[in-house]
Image (cartoon, helix red, strand yellow):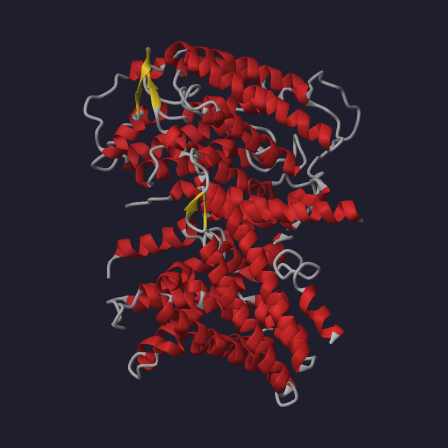
Amino acid sequence: MKNSFKELIKGLIHENPTFVLMLGLCPTLAVSISLINGLGMGVAATFVIIFSNILIAALKDVIPDKVRIPCYIVVIATFVTITELVMKAYFPPLNRALGIYVPLIVVNCIVLGRAEAFASKNKILNSLMDGIGMGIGFTMALLLISGIRELLGSGKLFGYNVFSNFEPMLIIAMPSGALLVIGLLLGFFNFLKGRKA
Amino acid sequence: MSKLIVPSSPHLHSGESVSRIMWTVILCLIPAGAAGVIIFGLSALWTIILAVVSAVLCEWLIQALTKRKISVLDGSAILTGLLLAYNLPAQVPFWIPIIGAIFSISIAKMAFGGLGQNIFNPALAGRVFLMASWPKYLTIFTKPFNYDAVTSATPLALLKEGKLVQHIPNWDLFLGIRGGCIGEVCIIALLAGALFLLIRGYISWHIPVSFIATAGLLTWAFGGKTFFSGDWIFHILSGGLILGAFFMATDYVTSPLTRKGHLVFGIGCGALTAVIRLWGGYPEGVSYAILIMNAATPLVDRYTKNRVYGTKIK
Amino acid sequence: MNASMFLTIFISAVFINNVILSRFLGLCSFIAISKETRPALAMSLAVMFVTTMSSIITWLIYRFLLIPFNMAYLRTISFILVIATFVQLVEMIIRKFAPALYRFFGIYLPLITVNCAVLGVAVLNSDMFFTADGKSMSGGFLYAAFQGICVGLGYTLAMLLMSAIRERLELCNVPKALKDFPLGFIIASIMSMAFMGFNGFRI
């Protein structure tokens, strides 16, 4: 049990998928304009990671080694399609905001990366924990980036005005702003790491 | 792969140094700034001072914090601040030049390792950053000689909106009596400074001439209602073309190394400027054009490198 | 179908909505493989080929298989399968018939399967060139194929610029915390700002 707890928390900081493993950057940058979008993407991706991890861990002895990648992709694509349909039915505005990045969870390297690197070699419980940890780590990173971008780019948090007299820095809400924010954040984390070492 | 080709000895020191070049360029830019202050009033002077001071302070602070050699007096930070201010309208809120200068120095220059290593022209990166962040302040211009009145119209903006009813006399454009950014309006002052740099050999003619000629040619060919009826004189004299071509595109660090590279760079800048002016959403494209070509500079260098005698082209 | 539409697609896909700098598709490969020009070029050419071909194939599948049989909800899963199969096939063919070419970009081909740019352009095509009730636009097929080429071109442009810049930066005294990835993002950010000059492009 202690072991599986370790699998859970490693995804949060030490192996944070976004800032340390540098996986799944495309959706991170594209949807992180507001906290709501970031949260939506984080939850959707977490759902896919958890369930594809479980299913792949359960099927790992059945899947022939040579065609494992296509098999993983089918498993992942199934859960992505479920997410897509649920989102379309129950959260249409969020679905519109996330756009093509919902189907693109299929090629989000975190999901396939965890399937290949972890779930295909570990027991179901550990894979579940790994999936939860990675999902939460991804969501946390998304919330950090989208929080910064929403605050600076539109002066709001979760859609509510924070400042009374603030000239929003429009560029932060644009694609180049996303690249800038993540570049500086990565630099900042490198700097912290360098200090510790 | 060595970028610096050192021929065989003996070597003679020419007495030139980076800081001397920087200070000369600053000197050559002063007439244009003075003209801007005369045309747009004291607010222009404040904008210039704020940009220069914050650029210098920012560089000093970063060098002190990272324990590098303090080199703020080599003039490069002052030049960056000056050029940034020249690319801003006179009556911007006081924090605009400050934030712009901080971005220019910290992100576009120091993050790359400081002087001589930046890929993009820091002043232009700062301007484009400000333009994208607070467009409404960067498109309000002071009316010439009418210091309190503002207008949102440069001649190019009027042209873009199709509101350029009466023709602005070329002579007015030449002297700088029009709405625009502080340092770009007075063509004659810019040309005087540029001439000095050319004569002293601090810049070569290749980039400015190919830049201006390409932009002129394309606006002449496609700028009018029929082919070859565009008002190319107007296009050359308005906007930041002269300032950009002589003082920003010629930056040693961010432009190619060889003569051939210079021509490619200049033609690219000119073509991009004309394309953005004629068909783009913005009225002016000089800063974007130069930045895009800055990004292409390492690639241009790669393909226009002088061949070492006796070796094959790779 | 008209010529100006093609020009709009070109400008939009290469400059305004550049796959990497504005849509962030294929960002992982962009950051990972842009250290040197030669591999970057190989990767770009491979991506361009695959985006073009997969645009064509997925358009055909969407138009003649998924829509007539009312299975548009299987879009994601069928597109990714088709792309994966196609890439595998190309890899096998190249390895068999053009070993030199295989050595040139062979190792990059499998990576392309999970390159979001490829699936991204397929999904974009099916969003852009089909009406909401599933009718195909006139000329949609050509638009889709052309968009595939242009997305590949945009990818190539960003890759080439970036790799040359990073080659030059190898010689520079970059602050330690910013080395490699962080500075890569900052460069991409300024590049993306520069490309904003094309915003609102109209012929």
Q: In which quarter of the view is residue B310 placed?
A: top right
Q: Which residue is rendered at x = 28% and y = 37% of the image?
A: B222
**Residue B307 image point, x, y percent:** 65, 41
Q: Is residue B257 visible?
A: no
Residue B46, placed above or below residue A56: above
Q: Which residue is rendered at x = 53% and y = 33% of the image?
A: B262
Q: In which quarter of the view is residue B209 placed?
A: top left
**Looking at the image, which residue sits at the far left?**
B165
Q: What quarter of the picture does the N terminus of chain C occupy?
A: bottom left
Front in this rendered view, residue B258 or B122: B122
**Looking at the image, which residue sits at the far bottom?**
A62
Front in this rendered view, residue C113 or A157: A157
**Residue C55 image point, x, y percent:** 40, 69
Count up the numbered dots: 0
**Residue B298 image point, x, y percent:** 59, 42
Q: Which residue is rendered at x = 27% and y = 73% of the image?
A: C134
Q: Which residue is rendered at x = 35% and y = 68% of the image?
A: C126
Residue C193, placed above or below residue A139: above
**Residue A32 image point, x, y percent:** 49, 54
Front in this rendered view, residue B195 or A107: A107
Residue B234, placed above or below residue C27: above
